[in-house]
Structures are given as structure tokens and as C-alpha cells.
Image (spheres, helix red, strand yellow):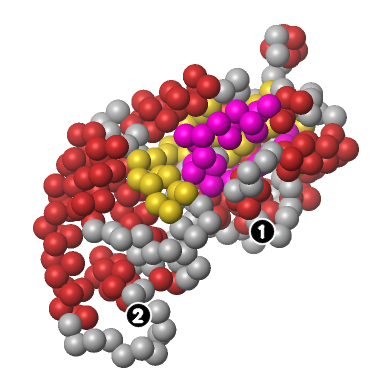
């Protein structure tokens, strides 16, 4: 029996390391009963950005050619941008029409305030946003908005981006709308408590119980070093002077210090606000054992009722 597992982020949860390792180990994963489609990038975000789901049918057809009993693994954190639309339903419909009816959605969550700080750092980085429209960010104001709404919306040159912080609400919505199971796993279990990111996920869906780290010799670990708070505020202002050789105005250093001072003063208040607003964020998480059990290949009786 064929099934599909869709690793849908979220952003800032070790997705890049996981995707690069899966892409590099695709031939070994296939031996373990997992088809991870290779494309121009190690992830599948460019497919998840498309308005249609024809690519799902293409992946399903290739899976059928490769195996009779196995798992199609799709990984794209950009699904997060489209959870509030009917795109997840369209993905499931395309899989069902292709004959793959056992579907699992896997979402990795980290502490909401930690996630916000990491996102704030990334969106402030001019090196990572050279082709995008720069969002206007202020740590406290953006944090209050995120705590109030449970998400933040941005618009770049090609995509409307939505980043979630109210995880239980998101999972409840998806479970009410989708036929497949929706599983949440803690960031630490997905990354830090494994040899490499995604060991738990691959071990749970492989036909022989092997880890992702067993499939690749030179694995990419999740060891990103976050910039300092001063570097983040410097990056934010620096991006308005796009060329590296541009002489910075006299007021630049003072402006960086003013933003840094404001952030340091407001950060404890914003963290407390996140703790108050999202105190139940772990409620949607599965333990590693439960996560593995729910992702194991369906037994004979469960297949009869799909």
C-alpha cells in the first residue's frame, strides 16, 4: 500500500538541513521504502508555491512506478503560507485521485517566542532577502501583533507569507478540514535530540526502521549560529543601503543603538505576552513514541477502512 507523508514545516525548525540530507540520501531512502522526489532544489517549496496541484499527480505516478508498498515523502515549509487557504484540501484531493489515500501531515513546532525571534532575525537579514520586498519591522510592535492575532502576514514580490504562532488553533483547523492525520512534533525531538534533523521522522516511516543519519555519510546537522541582537538591528537598517560599498550616513550607528536599546527594554514584556497568549502551545505535540506509532505503516485492518 502506498501512502504519503507531507512534512510542512513550520519555518525555522531545521527544515533546510532535513531537506538537504533527504535530497542527498534519496537513493538510500528509496531502499528503505521512501521516495523523496529530487528536483532543482533540495526542498519542494517551488512546487508548493504553484497555484495548481498537478505536481502532486506527477509525484504520485513516479511513486507507483518505483514501489508497490512504500511512502512518498514531500517536504515544503512554504505550505505554511497556504494553510489558511484551501490548498491543503486540493493536495489531498490530488493524492486521492492518484490512488494514494493514506496521508499524514507532519508539522514541527518550537517555542513561539523563540520562533518569533528567529523569524525576526531572518526577515531583517539583507543577504537572505535580496530579491524580496523588505518588511517593516519593529520588535515590540510586530511581537504584539503576533501575540494578538496568532500569526504574522507579509507580502514579498511573489508570495503572501503567513507565519503561525498559535499552533493548537492551526492544528485544530487542519484536523477539522483534512482527511489525513495531522501530527505535531517538538523542534527538539525533530532536531536536537537526534543525530541529524529528521531521524525520528525517517525512522518512523522507513520499512526497516533506519534513521536518516544511517542513509548518508556526510550529514548536514542543524547548527545554525544566530547573530547577536546588535547584528540583527544593524542588518535591518543596513538593508536600506543595498550596496555593500555604500558609505553609511553619520546617524547610522546611533540609529542601530536606539533600535537595540528599544528591543532590549521591550523583549521581556513581549516574551511574557507570548507566554500568556500561547501557554498551551505544547498541547498539539505528540510524544516521540506516539509520533512513531501513528506514522507506522497501516496494518491490514486499518487498510480496510480507508
User: Is 91 covered by the magenta stretch?
Assistant: yes
Would residue 184 be found to the left or right of residue 227 on screen?
Answer: right
User: Tag 2 or tag 1, which sits nearer the N-term?
Assistant: 1
Q: Which residues are magenta?
A: 71-93
In the picture, the quarter occupied by the N terminus is: top right
The residue identified by callout 2 is 241
Give how far across and how far down residue 192 sits, in percent. 45, 48
Q: Residue at x 24, y 58 (%)?
A: 138
Q: Are marks 1 and 2 in contact (CB under 8 Å)?
A: no
Q: Residues within 10 Å of mark 2 (few under 14, many from 20)?
A: some
SS assignment at label 1: loop
The residue identified by callout 1 is 41
Q: Residues within 10 Å of mark 1 (few under 14, many from 20)?
A: few
Q: Residue at x 50, y 68 (%)?
A: 131
Q: Residue at x 73, y 25 (%)?
A: 96
Give how far across and how far down residue 69 sits, in percent. 81, 28
In the picture, the quarter occupied by the C terminus is: top right
| Residue 148 visible in the picture | yes
Q: Residue at x 63, y 44 (%)?
A: 51
Would you place residue 108 above or below residue 14 in this image? Answer: above
User: Is 68 covered by the magenta stretch?
Assistant: no
Amino acid at each position: 500500500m502506498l501512502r504519503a507523508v507531507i512534512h510542512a514545516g513550520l519555518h525555522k525548525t531545521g527544515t533546510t538541513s532535513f531537506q538537504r540530507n533527504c535530497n542527498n540520501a534519496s537513493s538510500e531512502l528509496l531502499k528503505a521504502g521512501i521516495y523523496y522526489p529530487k528536483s532543482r532544489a533540495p526542498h519542494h517549496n517551488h512546487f508548493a508555491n504553484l497555484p495548481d496541484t498537478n505536481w502532486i499527480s506527477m509525484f504520485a505516478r513516479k511513486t507507483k512506478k518505483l514501489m508497490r508498498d512504500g511512502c512518498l515523502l514531500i517536504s515544503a515549509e512554504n505550505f505554511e503560507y497556504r494553510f489558511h487557504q484551501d490548498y491543503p484540501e486540493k493536495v489531498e484531493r490530488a493524492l486521492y485521485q492518484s490512488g494514494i489515500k493514506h496521508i499524514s501531515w507532519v508539522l514541527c513546532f518550537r517555542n513561539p517566542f523563540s520562533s518569533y525571534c528567529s523569524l525576526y532575525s531572518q526577515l531583517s537579514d539583507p543577504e537572505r532577502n535580496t530579491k524580496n520586498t523588505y518588511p517593516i519591522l519593529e520588535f515590540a510592535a510586530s511581537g504584539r501583533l503576533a501575540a494578538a492575532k496568532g500569526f504574522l502576514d507579509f507580502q514579498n514580490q511573489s508570495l503572501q507569507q503567513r507565519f503561525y504562532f498559535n499552533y493548537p488553533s492551526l492544528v485544530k483547523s487542519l484536523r477539522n478540514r483534512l482527511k489525513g492525520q495531522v501530527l505535531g512534533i517538538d523542534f527538539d525531538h525533530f532536531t536536537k535530540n537526534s543525530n541529524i534533523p529528521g531521524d525520528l521522522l525517517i525512522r518512523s516511516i522507513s520499512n526497516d526502521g533506519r534513521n536518516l543519519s544511517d542513509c548518508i555519510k556526510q550529514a548536514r546537522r542543524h547548527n545554525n549560529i544566530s547573530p547577536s541582537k546588535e547584528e540583527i538591528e544593524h542588518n535591518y537598517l543596513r538593508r536600506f543601503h543595498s550596496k555593500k560599498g555604500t558609505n553609511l550616513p553619520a546617524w547610522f550607528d546611533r540609529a542601530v543603538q536606539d533600535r537595540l536599546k528599544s528591543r532590549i527594554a521591550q523583549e521581556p514584556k513581549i516574551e511574557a505576552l507570548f507566554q500568556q497568549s500561547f501557554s498551551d502551545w505544547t498541547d498539539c505535540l505528540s510524544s516521540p513514541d506516539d509520533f512513531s506509532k501513528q506514522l507506522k505503516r497501516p496494518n491490514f485492518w486499518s487498510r480496510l477502512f480507508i
